[in-house]
Amino acid sequence: MRIKKIVYYEPLDDLAHLHSKFSNLNIMMNFTKLLVRFNIQYKVSCKFLLTLCIVISVDVFGAKEVDVALVTEHFPPYQIVDQNNVLSGFTTELMIEVMKRSQYRYSINAYPWTVAYNFALKKPNHCIFSIARLSSRENLFTWIGRITENNKAIVWGLKNKQNYKISSLEDIKKYTTAVKRNNAPHQALLEMGFSEGINLYVLDNSNALINILYSRSEIDFIVADDITISYRAKLAGIDINQLHKEYEISNLWSEFYLACNKNTNQKVIDNLTLIIDEIHKDGTYQRLLGNWKNKMSYRK
């Protein structure tokens, strides 16, 4: 599976320095091809190549070992990977601030959600954001701190199909709701008694969520909060006013968190927890949130 976006940060480092190191890695790879092409004597070439590999690999990888590997997904407006593969967004900026204060060497990688989730689940010193704190996940991760405000989960449908009679979650179960695989609505609705293939239609691509309301007549609803729905509509080229709030699901992903693998170094856990608490108390959180408020509004 192709990685959607990789961004690398490290204290006291810069992108030009990083680029030069990866250029060295390309030189090493090209040199290897050259040796094979001209069939240079095995013993001499291997000995030289081994030395070259050691020197360059220390430069490229040794200096780039990280204390914390952050993983995330493209989830506008919290994490945004644009067409130029630049990663931005409110929680992205928040996590950069956290890591700057920590002074840890770190990386931020944006993957498809399932890939990011499994990295954080299985690899020590890997942490994931923005992740909903569901009961089914509670014992799977070490939960560091809240990184978003409360967001209400909304069931959305098309206005021109407003012939539904919805007054409870049980009414929603009579129809078909599209969700993204392994995300919070998917897992939460399964916990609430929904079933794949019966009243849940599972997608691997979140960008298709709104489009599927138009392209598949059997799909009645999607689930998103007030904040992300406007971005999904914009990406799909759809007027958000064509969508209608059908039902508000209580107790579904009220907040997003930073969470780490259960085997992450305890000093890292304690330090990140303290820093996130400080960021909420010293006004940094509200300042960063204020910078993104206009971009994160539902209707204008």
Image (tube, helix red, strand yellow):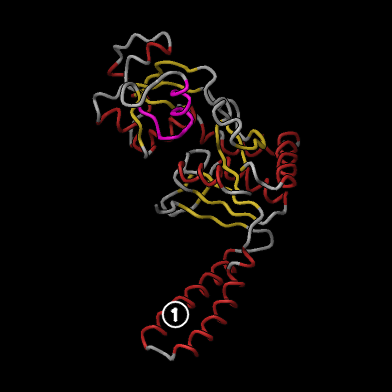
Q: Is residue 173 above or below residue 95?
A: above
Q: What x and y, as percent, mark residue 80?
A: 48, 44
Q: Residue at x 61, y 43 (%)?
A: 261
Q: What x and y, as percent, mark residue 163?
A: 29, 11
Q: Is residue 159 above or below residue 59?
A: above
Q: Residue at x 39, y 52 (%)?
A: 1
Describe residue 60's horizontal placement relative to residue 299 as left or right: right
Q: Residue at x 48, y 18 (%)?
A: 249
Q: Specify whether residue 223 is in view.
A: yes
Q: Amino acid at mark 1?
A: Thr
Q: Is residue 22 above or below residue 300?
A: below
Pointer 1: what residue? 32
Describe residue 239's horizontal placement relative to residue 51 as left or right: left
Q: Nearer the viewer, residue 98 or 261?
A: 261
Residue 271's quadrant in the figure?
top right
Describe residue 84's horizontal placement relative to residue 158 as left or right: right
